Image: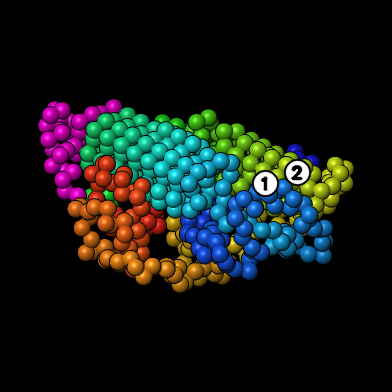
Amino acid sequence: MITNLARKNKGKKNTNFRGYIKELASWSCIVLHKNKSFISDYPDTERIQWVVDSGQYAEEKLENTKHGIDYDFSLDFFTNFQNLFKKINLPNLYFEWENENSDYASGIYFVKNAYLSFTVINWCENVLYSFSVKDYSNNVLNSVMVWNHSENVYFCSWIIKSFNVFYSRYIINSSNIYFSTNLVSCEECIFCDNLENQKYCIRNQKLEKDEYFRKKKEILSEKKEFYKWFLSLNKIWKNIWSSNSTGNFIVNSEDISNACFVYQAKNWRNLILSGWVNWLENSYDMFLWWSPYAKNCYCVEASWWVENVYCSYSIWDSYEIYYSYFLENCSFCFWCVSLKNKNYCIFNKEYDKEEWHDLVEKIFRQMEVDWSLWKFFPSHINPFYFNDTLASLILDFSKEEVTKDWYMRRDNQIKVDIPENLEVINSKDLDIINYDEEILKKVIKDESGNYYRITKMEYNFLKKHDLPLPEIHWLDRIKLGFKF
């Protein structure tokens, strides 16, 4: 059966890039909402049943077969799936394994001290206002895609194996970098672009060590200019150590098409924010992919150590999984939601092996007839506001385009409760250079009318590295990482 399904899958491999982003990236939310008594990825809408805290969710995940349903052949497949999806409680914020002091972050695994950050995995520490930080990366603020033993990274995007990098983009194996782009194995560079194995450079001009540090001191005294300098950075990327690859910032990869933010992959199509220290091969239409092992996967978002997984979301240590959502250590589970340690399930209902195979074949035949086979979860099931997701950051989609396809869209600003005893200061009146711990007691309002505060962890980092206060809301700082 699996061999036949994989062969049928070939017809879907030509998904255009825009459709791929619209389908998959719209399931990755970077805005937190108030949902009942919780702070949650999920807004309070009729598309989900309820959210519960992560501890309760972990317990329920072991018992969600009790919510299993029989497949109703009088309904189309996605109506059946939606009926199950709306019966299962979802986690207010998605955690896995052990985390510490990270109650206001989502998509985190083995993390300490993460705050208002998303998709942070594998022994990272002190991560604020950032997206896609992984593999022993520490002290990362206001940044997107910081991977593989990076440390002390501020206002950056696409940083790999680097240390002390500030207001920069596309940096690999480098240290002590400011306002620079497209550097590989460089040290002590400012305002540089497209350099490799260089040291003590300003605007791509190599200087004597003493002269370099004299000018560095002068430049870094102009703190009011830092944000403007960052906005003026070169947005043209290099695909480094890669062959036969098309897309944005593809590193050490082969035969890649329609991709961006990719590290060590081979023979992939439609791939974003994905990579691992080991090479990943032969999959299609993947998003937020960072598994050390993946084989025969298609149209999957955010999964780990999997094989034969198709059209699914957030699958861990599992194989032979189709059209499923939040599964862990499962096998032969088709069309299931929020299960752990289960086998041979269909719509969360357990079957014996023979009965399972017979029913799977019948459902697949119906899916082929109604043209739902190999389509990802449809827009009318998507529980997120489209403009709160990564899809809206990666590409521009009009309101009409998303609403006509039955995605939800948020038109109103999220209400922020400001404690009455806190002083509100406009960012234009903010002294971003000469500040002290009194700033921790204030709320800052940026020029777009958004409110934010300076946390103690953030304050300590800024003071240590002699950096100015941020002048825009934390979510807008994350969004800057996707402007390319």
Q: Position of residue 166 (x, y in %)?
A: 29, 42
Q: CA distance from mark 2 to mark 1?
A: 9 Å
Asked if labels 1 and 2 touch by Cβ distance under 8 angstroms, the answer is yes
Observer-nearest of 163 and 386 = 163
Q: Amino acid at mark 2?
A: Lys
* Membership of 216 in magenta stretch: yes
**Region rendered in magenta:** 195-224
Q: Position of residue 234 (x, y in %)?
A: 29, 46
Q: Name the residue beneath numbered marker 1.
A: 327
Q: Dot 1 surroundings within 10 Å: few (below 14), some, or many (20 or more)? A: many
Looking at the image, residue 224 sits to the left or right of residue 376; the answer is: left
Image point 78% across, 54% down: which residue? 66
The quadrant in which residue 412 appears is: bottom left
As drawn, the label of residue 342 is 2
Q: Is residue 108 visible?
A: yes
Looking at the image, residue 205 sits to the left or right of residue 139; the answer is: left
Image point 38% across, 67% down: which residue? 419
Image point 40% across, 48% down: which residue? 128
The single residue placed furthest to the front in the displayed view is 421
Observer-nearest of 218 and 63 = 63
Q: Quadrant of the N terminus?
A: top right
Q: Dot 2 surroundings within 10 Å: few (below 14), some, or many (20 or more)? A: many
Q: Is residue 484 visible?
A: no
State the SS at label 1.
strand
